Amino acid sequence: MIKNMGSADRGIRLVIAALLIALYFSGVVTGTLGVIALILAGVFTLTSIVSFCPLYTIVGLNTCRNSSVK
């Protein structure tokens, strides 16, 4: 799997994931929207850890400087 996410993109996703988790556990976002927020936070965290976003592949986007790194 070729990395297609740069460090800035990964950092932004982790910040958004942390924000979504904080909103859920503080009770600001609840119910179905809260569950969706947690799932989205999990996806953002996972894609940040592995530096690969399947959606970027479909769209043809690459934010990684060195895309040949595996």
Image (spheres, helix red, strand yellow):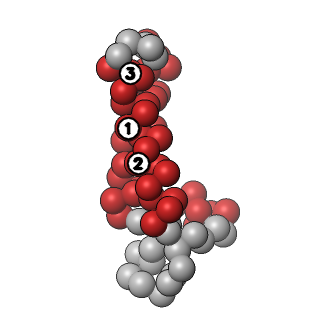
Q: In which quarter of the image is the N terminus?
A: bottom left
Number of marks in the rendered image: 3
Residue 43, placed above or below residue 19:
below
Res. 40 in view = yes
The 10 Å Cα crowd at callout 2, few under 14, some 14 to 19, many 20 or more, is: many
Label 2 amino acid?
Leu
Q: Which mark is residue 24?
A: 3
In the shown orientation, is residue 63 left or right of residue 14?
A: right
**Residue 62 % position (x, y):** 59, 71
Tell me which residue sits at (66%, 69%) in the image: 60
Q: Quadrant of the C terminus?
A: bottom left
Give the camera-side residue of 30 and 12.
12
Q: Name the residue under label 1.
A: 18
- Tell me the distance, in whole angstroms, between the alpha carbons under discs 3 and 2: 15 Å
- CB of mark 3 within 8 Å of CB of mark 2? no
Residue 32, placed above or below residue 21:
above
Label 1 amino acid?
Ala
SS label for mark 1: helix
